[in-house]
Amino acid sequence: MTANDPTVKPSDQPSGQERALHTREATNPSSQIVRFPEGAPLTLSSGRTFGPFDVAYQTYGALNAAKSNAILLCHALTGDQYAAGDNPVTKKPGWWTTLVGPGKSIDTDKYFVICTNTLGGCLGSSGPASINPSTGKAYGLDFPVITIADMVAAQARLIEHLGIEQLFSVVGGSMGGMQVLEWAARFGDRVFSAIPIATAPRHSAQNIAFHEVGRQAVMADPEWRAGRYLEEGAFPKNGLAVARMAAHITYLSEEALQIKFGRNLQARTQKTFSFDADFQIESYLRHQGSTFVDRFDANSYLYITRATDYFDMEAEFGGKLANAFQGTKTRFCVVSFTSDWLYPTRESRDIVRALNAVAANVSFVEIDSDKGHDAFLLEEKVLFRTVEGFLSAAAEARGLTVGGRS
Amino acid sequence: MTANDPTVKPSDQPSGQERALHTREATNPSSQIVRFPEGAPLTLSSGRTFGPFDVAYQTYGALNAAKSNAILLCHALTGDQYAAGDNPVTKKPGWWTTLVGPGKSIDTDKYFVICTNTLGGCLGSSGPASINPSTGKAYGLDFPVITIADMVAAQARLIEHLGIEQLFSVVGGSMGGMQVLEWAARFGDRVFSAIPIATAPRHSAQNIAFHEVGRQAVMADPEWRAGRYLEEGAFPKNGLAVARMAAHITYLSEEALQIKFGRNLQARTQKTFSFDADFQIESYLRHQGSTFVDRFDANSYLYITRATDYFDMEAEFGGKLANAFQGTKTRFCVVSFTSDWLYPTRESRDIVRALNAVAANVSFVEIDSDKGHDAFLLEEKVLFRTVEGFLSAAAEARGLTVGGRS
């Protein structure tokens, strides 16, 4: 795509090799995968049962004999199980290689790290792009609407399958942080420690609004074909690209956008008086949109945004957030970033307040950053030190030896 | 449109009577109109000349004999010349009837109020939906890319045409406020007083980002037909609706959204576990999108957002905002709102600082409001009192009698 030519839309690009890969990964993933049979379905928040279902996952490091050193990572909205190592679709390093690896803050020499593709996702766990065994075609909109709790229930089944009675830690940012909270609330005995980062106990009206714009952009694209694009050999690239562009604005702070792009022109010295991408910020957003459509399924985007919009732990636990954590023995480390306007610090404080109300073991760190919400994915040394320090202390409390092999 | 059915898109609606009206108004407006002949073209910021061109306008109140009581109102992005009275397209009251009318803050018993449809607009002033006299078809993308300065230049020609040597005041919010600043900078001698409200001296990276998402949404819609939809009897309703939805989020504060909608469900007691508009905020945004497409031209949306993105008075005046106002005798009243995150108070302060640097007569009011950017269009009594008080004092300084007939 020539970002400068407004008439060249993503739809005019040759069908990306990456997208072919991602379509293949949805039904035939490179990951390890566990299929839970029809006889052992999930009971979803909606009341429906769903099965058989697949959970695709990656692991890093080695599980110790006591099975006491496992850390579950929960990915964000458009993340996947490739937290470390290379991603087979994008051929790029995993989304949390900054934090996860040998000798890093989540040290795979010490810990056994598990990351699943979320239920509803598109890289091997059951989602709308998966084959519906009862029709032999992609589920599309026949996939059930799921919640964060359903995602966690599917993960819990995998952890059982792996024979791990208690996770040493559950860690995640953004939507991953919601899953961390849900794990601690629903399976407290199975979570020794929990690190919810840059997240919130509920989705605000503004959060829902941005997601609804994205969903409408996807569904407005005629190539969405009422959700049946995979059957019909189509793909709503344009709509999904617009959805990604809108969402991307919320991932960066206003300050970060100003510092990174300001009003700088893109590869030109003067305004063109046209609809070209004169400004760097325009070129950047177009790039974000056009690369995203090659790695993500449009219906997955609908389902996963819906799950986060439905997320409201207060409503889920009798109108009081503290109820979710009553009697918890889990050790918490809650992290927020000063310039995150998607899930601002005050929402992390709501979590901390609820935990304090039940006398939980909780530390809270607000990290000074101008990078906005995306700070949790970036080279943020205070985050690295915070996670490493918290895990070390938790490891000591848990009686894990430094080598992590106890 | 059944807001609750995701498969019912704006494109499935019967073609609105309003849209037929708006298309007619673009070429054959109900407003007064002045056509400036080909021999007296505008020289645009791009260096191109443009003519003949039309300026459609409305007036309220009576011009006094001295022609000293004229107030020019400048409308915002998707506004029009119907500031007061009824709008012939929407059949609703004008956009500033809260502020403008007999006995109101901008008192049409005292002042002669003029409001033009901006150049690039779609209710009678020359814009992309107007007929290009050299082809007999709508301009579409053959319309020149214009700037805020060009809009003001067209207005200035109308004011000359009306024989008004000096405007008693120029008043506007948001994009209208940018025009106010441009008037004061370019035609200082012709502006006795100026009230820029909820505006900025330049468009930030985040502002540009939101506009670019909107433009991409419009251009991604196949019904945009590379800008030639009017010729081809089409209209990019879906894309324009998505653009409006994204923009609308920026018009309200996060707090206002939370207070107004929160996580309230829309006409139901339980979540539907579907992609229906379960939440009030979703239903509201869909409504904003679907009503907008019946009253506004998609290409106008591209041109006018582009004009605001190009707006940067500092760059325009030699890299120093104060240069724009050197030697000004205009009296300024700068107004911002605490919860406006589209054009936050700090940007109004930049204007005030530049005015102070040239020892201008300036008062600055930051109004405490939780309504966000849209506060300037709402029932905001502090705004009413501020405008009324400032105009009264200016009238006294100008020697206008209370009756405004001197």
Image (spheres, coloured by chain):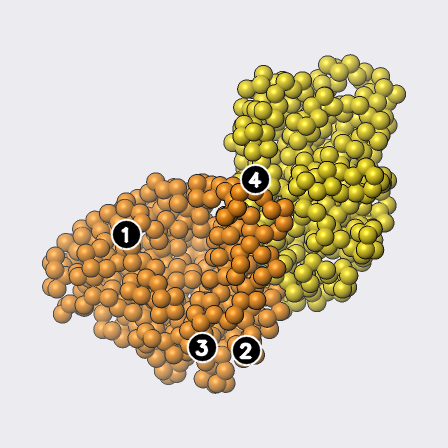
Chain colours: A yellow, B orange
Would you say A264 lies left or right of A28 here? Answer: left
Residue appearing at x 46%, y 59% in the figure? B308
Question: What's the CA distance linking mark 3 and mark 1?
Answer: 35 Å
Other-residue count near label 4 (Cα within 10 Å), few / some / many at <14 / 14–19 / ≥20? many
Residue ID at (48%, 50%): B250
The residue under label 1 is B332
**Of marks 2 and 3, the one in the foreground:** 2
CB of mark 2 within 8 Å of CB of mark 3? no
Q: Chain of mark 4?
A: A
Residue A364 can be seen in this image:
no
Q: Residues within 10 Å of mark 2 (few under 14, many from 20)?
A: few
Q: Where is B200 relative to B150, above or below?
A: above
Marked residue chain, label 2 = B
Task: Quickly name the residue at label 4.
Answer: A203
- Crowding at dot 3, Cα within 10 Å, few <14 / some 14-19 / many 20+, comes out as many
Q: Which residue is mark 2?
A: B233
Q: Nearer the viewer, mark 1 or mark 2?
A: 2
